[in-house]
């Protein structure tokens, strides 16, 4: 019997949003001597679905592409700090709360409906989605209250962020990315290519300019 492989679906933050998450994660790590987030390379992101277990990799890639191409550029917004998890289970998390657009919520619901037909999904994916960008986890139990109080005394900026791409990870490495501005699926090399990233940002700037012109004409 073929062994299942682990996948994860997320979107990665960029620009101001990415910098803020990285800065505060390292700030908390230094101030409280915790390294659950910073011990490896920090990649600010928001998990959409995962972990995903399946033996049908090509079908997984196809279903994600076919679903994503029906959606346009979407947004999220930072909405303060949040915490969840259990001290008994040792899975406490401190994070930035994400307020998602209705379109992103619908995209996730549609993806779960399709992927659940041939994938094993996490029990958390059947519950109400609480999107977040992790600041600290794993080694924070003894300092959880201190870190939480520290964050609650800080102002979290209401940063609005565009969901430019959705990333499919295989064993924690990029397998594919769907680009909402280029309207295509990128393989790992294409996803990491700087020129491709510049193209995406250029298309975003053009889209924003067009939106602003349209707004000013009303």
Image (cartoon, helix red, strand yellow):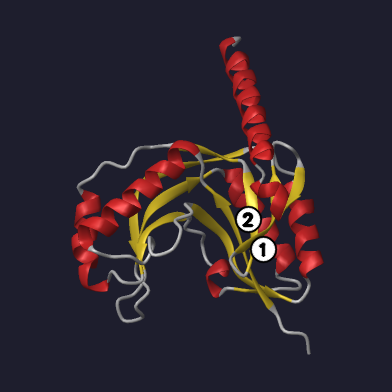
In the displayed orientation, state which residue is furthest to the top.
217
Residue 134: quadrant of the picture: bottom left
Which quadrant of the rendered structure holds the N terminus?
bottom right
Q: Residue furthest bottom?
A: 1
Judging from the image, what secondary structure is the residue with disc 2 in? helix
Q: Position of residue 44 (x, y in %)?
A: 47, 52
* x and y, in percent, of residue 100 in the image: 51, 46
The crowding category of the residue bearing disc 2, from other C-alpha atoms within 10 Å (few below 14, some 14 to 19, many at least 20), is: some
Q: Residue 75 is drawn in which quadrant?
A: top right
The answer to whether marks 1 and 2 mark residues whose Cβ atoms lie closer than 8 Å is yes
Crowding around mark 1 (Cα neighbors within 10 Å: few <14, some 14 to 19, many 20+) is: some
Q: Is residue 63 left or right of residue 192?
A: right
> Could you tell me which residue is drawn at 55 percent across and 43 percent down?
101
Q: Quadrant of residue 112?
A: bottom right
Q: Is residue 155 above or below residue 205?
A: below
**Residue 100, relative to residue 143: is it above or below?**
above
The residue closer to the viewer here, 192 or 111, is 192
Residue 172, image x, y percentages: 58, 66
For residue 108, the mark is: 2
Q: Residue at x 60, y 19 (%)?
A: 209
The answer to which of 10 and 118 lies nearer the viewer is 10
As rendered, which of 8 and 153 lies closer to the eye?
8
Question: Looking at the picture, how far across and down is residue 155, in whole percent?
Answer: 26, 41
Q: Looking at the image, which residue is at 75% across and 71% down?
A: 117
Residue beneath disc 1: 112
Q: Is residue 191 left or right of residue 156?
A: right
In the displayed structure, 62 sits above or below 171; it is above
Instruction: Name the secondary structure under disc 1.
Output: helix
Q: Residue at x 76, y 40 (%)?
A: 183
Q: Distance from label 1 to label 2 (Cα)?
A: 6 Å
Looking at this view, is 108 or 148 the one in front?
A: 148
């Amino acid at each position: 019997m073929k062994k299942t492989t682990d996948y994860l679906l997320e979107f990665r933050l960029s620009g101001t949003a990415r910098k803020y998450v990285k800065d505060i994660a390292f700030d908390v790590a230094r101030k409280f001597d915790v390294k659950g987030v910073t011990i490896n390379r920090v990649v600010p992101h928001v998990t959409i679905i995962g972990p995903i277990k399946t033996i049908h990799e090509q079908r997984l890639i196809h279903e994600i592409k076919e679903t994503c191409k029906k959606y346009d550029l979407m947004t999220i917004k930072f909405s303060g700090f949040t915490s969840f998890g259990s001290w008994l289970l040792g899975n406490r998390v401190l994070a930035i709360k994400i307020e998602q657009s209705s379109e992103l919520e619908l995209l996730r619901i549609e993806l779960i409906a399709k992927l659940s037909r041939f994938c094993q999904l996490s029990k958390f994916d059947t519950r109400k989605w609480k999107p977040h960008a992790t600041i600290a986890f794993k080694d924070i139990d003894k300092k959880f209250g201190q870190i939480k109080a520290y964050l609650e005394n800080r102002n979290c900026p209401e940063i609005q962020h565009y969901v430019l791409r959705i990333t499919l990870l295989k064993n924690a490495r990029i397998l594919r990315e769907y680009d909402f501005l280029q309207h295509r699926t990128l393989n790992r090399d294409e996803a990491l290519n700087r020129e491709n990233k510049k193209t995406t940002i250029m298309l975003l700037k053009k889209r924003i300019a067009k939106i602003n012109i349209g707004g000013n004409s009303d």
